Image: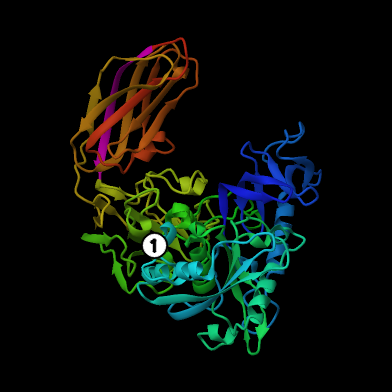
Amino acid sequence: MSGIFGETLTFTQEGGAPLRLVTFGDERYSRTETPEGFTVLYDDGPGLFCYADRTADGALFSTGVPVEAAPPDHVPRHVQDAADRRRAWIRARTEWMLPPPGPHQLPVDPEALLTFGPDGGLLRGRRLDAGDVRGLTVLVRFPDLDTTVGEGEVDQLLNGEDFRGHGNACSVSEYFRTVSSGRLHYTNTVVGPFTLSRPRLAYASETHRGLLVPEAIELALRSGVDLSDFDSLGEGIVDALSIMYAGRTEYRGDLWPHNWVHEVHQGSTRTQLYTVTSTGRRPADLSIGTFCHEAGHMLMRWPDLYDYGRAEREGDSFESAGIGSYCVMGSGNHLDVGRTPAPVSVYLRDLSGWCGNEVVLEPGRRHQAQQGDFDTVLRHRTTRDHEYFLVENRSRAGFDTHLPSSGLAVYHCDTRGSNEFQQGTAAQHYQCALLQADGRHDLEAGADSGDGEDLYGRVAGTALSHATRPHSRTWDGADSGLTISDIDPPGPVIGFTVGPVDAPTDVVTAESAPRLAIPDDRPAGVSDVLHLDAAGTVRSLVVSVDVTHPSAGDLRVHLTSPAGRRAVLHDGGGDSHDLHLRLGSAPPSPLQVLTGQPVTGDWVLSVSDVAARDAGRLDRWRLELTPGS
């Protein structure tokens, strides 16, 4: 499946000009909004996107008012179908696309078609994750839309050696050969383009749902394609079938990029799993990212590592980001506009048997993680076979060039989890959770698909343990025994120590009395620095701040650690004179996010006045830190 998480995309209208709309969902259920937040539906009558409203029983309907006009007064923003109607849509489309009963049929269990991997973390079905796999790619176009993208350009995109065309990092074949460390050689025979019988937008409508794939296969068979040429295992099933249509990607109906099942028999061989993607309007639009994502489902049976936000699975409609941009099976297929997708995370490479070198992270030893070493897995085991931690160097280079962060990645893995479960409880948690170094859990909160503070940069002292935030405890709250310390800065090789490092236990104190004037109504405010030289990381801390000001409710105060992590100490509110803070780090204090940070370096206190008329002064502040290991 190919999920979209609030991206602004271009949609075609039969009766009007293309529109830019914000999109949420996947091929089974999606919702589109205007940039201003009004939900819209495509109305086949006028052939236009129109503002949507909701009936008393929770069904969305078109108001008939085109998006180009002002929204009707009674229409609210962000209106959605009721949860039971969303569930009904999803179930119907899931069941509709299941194969008929018979031998080698894929599982009917809906759980197996979501992010939960029921077969040791992977989806059920035949896997082709090693050896020579020869896929069939069928190019199709429409009577009302041609393309300048031909068979030769697509052949190079899929099979080219040293391919760098149109800004792509490599071809699809090179991508999988690289991330599998040479274990998988996946190539495609490209046929077409063939012209479909209906205009392009007909295949985007519900009326004609399910027609594109069988028609494309039929055209390929009529041209003389022999399906038995694409059955490497001799099981009578085509290894890989990909359909690529002309024009930009349309996130509607059959045109939404997807991977599913359709069976067509030719003699003793039949099709089964297939993918649908687009070629774009011209060769410069060609990119490998989404093709690689869908092929990951089709060949290796990898699950999606993102959250569909489906109420029937979690009891909520919350869309977290899952693993975000840090894996091609999250949203990493979209990096660099799909031209340099993220690599397959070590979690999925390990499940596919693509890591020939396993390093067990032994306490008391210094280990090294090499960027781009796809053949190695660095593992910390727990008392459960299905739950463990993996470490990986994700410094910006190669397929990691466009990641939002750079440094050491630590993943909390459980093959019985699901990346729909953002709750982080013993019963509901991710299958592969990136432990975000900033401790903010932005991926779980759906705040972004990754930011610059997610991975571990240079850390002197303890970076991760049972007592830090994030922590290395197991999902049931027990100490896993994993401690990581003294991490090198991002680079081709990152060294790190497994286990605690020696650190003093005496309280380290420092204070300043700057008597700095705080400018009125200036968000930038003022800052003061305390430099500490003590070793170790923060086990606990206490911060005291004294500010003279006529209205403490105008003030914003935050403290930044030497590693750049920020804690908000005061965020306005109240009508008292002056501000006198004394905060400890015990939960649920805002200072908790600073535990585990290195002690050494500059600690910066910033104070700003964000309202007019009153001015004040930062009188003094004090730090009391207890280092730990």
As displayed, is residue 167 above or below residue 354?
A: above
Name the residue tied to disc 1.
164
* Residue 138 in view in this figure: yes
What element does badge 1 sit on?
Answer: loop
Q: Residue 73: horizontal and vertical position, in percent? A: 76, 31
As displayed, is residue 273 above or below residue 339?
A: below
Image position of 313 (left or right of 56): left
Q: Is 621 covered by the magenta stretch?
A: yes
Q: Residue 243: horizontal and vertical position, in percent? A: 59, 69
Q: Quadrant of residue 375?
A: bottom left
Q: Residue 629: horizontal and vertical position, in percent? A: 25, 47
The range drawn in magenta is 616-629
User: Which residue is depicted at the point 24% across and 28% down?
Assistant: 530
Image position of 352 (left or right of 109): left
- Amino acid of disc 1: Arg
Q: Quadrant of residue 604?
A: top left
Q: Residue 92: horizontal and vertical position, in percent? A: 73, 63
* Residue 323 in view in this figure: no
User: Which residue is depicted at the point 60% across and 62% down?
Assistant: 246
Give whichever of 246, 324 is nearer the camera: 246
Give whichever of 226, 599 is nearer the camera: 226
